[in-house]
Image (tube, coloured by chain):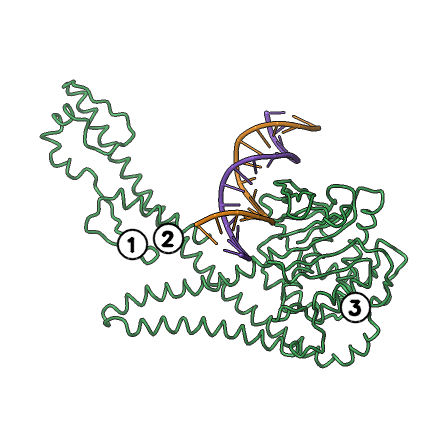
Chain colours: A green, B purple, C orange
Amino acid sequence: MYKKLTSKMEATCNDISNVAVTQSSPTMSFNGKRLVVDEIDFFAEKKKKKKSEVDDQMVHHQMELPNTSLDLLITNSTSTSNRSNMEEELSEAKDNTRNKFVAMLSELQEMNAENQRLRELVHNLNNKYNALHKDLMKLTHKQHENEINGAIKENDKRDDMIIPRSLLDIGIATKEDPSQQHYSERKLQESKNIIDKLDSGKDSEKSMVDQHESPADHKALWGWISTEATRLSSLRDVDQASETMSMIKKARVSVRARTDSSMISDGCQWRKYGQKMAKGNPCPRSYYRCSMGTACPVRKQVQRSAEDQSVLITTYEGQHNHVLPPTAKAMASTTSAVTSMLLSGSMLSSDGLIHPNILESTAALSCSQNTAATLSASAPFPTITLDLTQSATNNSSQLLQGAPQDNQHSLLSPVLAQKFMSSATNIFDQGTETASFVDTVNAATAAITADPKFSAALMAAITSIIGGSHSNINGTSGDIQHGNNN
DNA sequence: CGTATTTGACCTGCGC
DNA sequence: GCGCAGGTCAAATACG
């Protein structure tokens, strides 16, 4: 936005400076560049010779005036009435040009003001981001300390828990892994280092200025450079934040489901925009984008499994920027939660391994339903795969104590379901992309920290929702209410 | 006729 | 630099 506006303003300035015949004039500063802008009398020269020469000039030439787009018809007539008409038209043309120029100037000033406001906005956002980031680190640190304290007790309780092979196969670290012990501390240290680097960057810029010029030049120069330093620093932070944002946008949730139909119904409207043959798979991959909202960034890929063509793999990517229908909301919230947990520090260690908390939660998911959740660390962007194709043989009561099991559509206890849905809704149902990633992570972390059953509830909710769909997918009904992520 | 889908061309990132 | 594969675009086509 800022860059766009800047380039637009630069273009405007160039246009103006091209038009303006510069004279000694007051200067305007734009983005550190000096612009010479003044009110120019385009007709000054012509005025001088106007009285004596204008008639002849007009007769013999097509007037050396800027094209004012007025249709000034010049004839060879020498009658006085025509002459006075032409003079009137000429002065009108002058006035028009002057008015246009004044209008452009005022527009430029407005844009300058807007530019200033945007700068302040970016700066404020940057400050808020930093504050939230620090809070997140504190929370993560606190949470990890709590985990360490309760680790022994938890381990005793969960000794009989079955961890699925699919999770062990992907190299998940266990609590005994000593590298996990300092996960939060390392992360905190990394963030401190980043902040230190930024600060030192500012300091070095300042020291460069301090040594730079004579005192006379110093003041003006410092004004400009400090503005630039602030701007660059902001851009660095914005880059950092945007990188994080792009990560969460790129995070994917993949759903494997056994179905004959070409696409699972997930409550959203999709428009197909491409199809491609993927290597090593006889079935084409289809590309869809969400058509429910204008310019909604959410996309999904649908492809049949190469190994088992009855299995449909649907991969969701991005966050919806519009209000979702209730049928799509549940899954969207759920997959948002998974995605954000996936990307928050509470899930992944700095080693790229899955945090023990999530291991437990994911194990809960896998054990609690006919579903396996796996995390791909090798993919360019984090991807969680929910496998709905496994046969219903697992005991679902191992972790979700009190969860009713008589209902294949909802194995989630009503209390936990409500808790989960309200949490997920509070956290993720922002409806727009503008919801801060940091807010999301903070909220997710806070929710998990506040409620030890949250993780289990979350996973149970996923299986509940997907489980319902799954049974539909495998059943005769084509009306599958499957959600997509975010 | 407006909207959705198809499909070949094009772009981009990555490995060699 | 080149080729490959994944992803996207947009003109052509189909459909209601």
Residue A38, horizontal then vertical, whole percent: 25, 48
Q: Give SS at disc 3.
A: loop
Q: Secondary structure at mark 2?
A: helix
Q: CA distance from mark 1 to mark 2?
A: 10 Å
Instruction: Please provide percent x and percent y for residue A32.
Output: 32, 58
Query: Element type at marker 1?
Result: strand
Q: Work out whether residue A264 or residue A108 is closer to the camera in this orientation and state it.
A: A264
Residue at 70% across, 49% down: A314
Residue placed most toward the observer, A223 or A339: A339
Who is closer to the viewer here, A131 or A448? A448
Q: Which residue is mark 3?
A: A163
Q: Nearer the viewer, residue C1 or A48?
A: C1
Residue positioned most to the right: A406
Please determine if labels 1 and 2 lie on a single subunit: yes
Would residue A123 appear left or right of A283 to someone viewing this image? Answer: left
Q: Label 2 sits on what residue type? A: Asn
Q: Is residue A391 above or below residue C12?
A: below
Q: Position of residue A381 (x, y in %)?
A: 61, 58
Letter of the chain that mark 1 sits on in the rendering: A
Residue A28: which disc?
1
Residue A315 appears at what percent x and percent y? 68, 51
A19, above or below A151, in the image: above
Quadrant of the frame with the C terminus of chain A: bottom right
Q: Are marks 1 and 2 in contact (CB under 8 Å)?
A: yes
Q: Chain of mark 2?
A: A
Left or right for A197, reference A134: left
List the residue tagged with mark 2.
A112
Q: Dot 3, crowdedness within 10 Å: few (<14), some or many (≥20)?
A: some
Badge 1 or badge 2: first in the primary sequence = 1
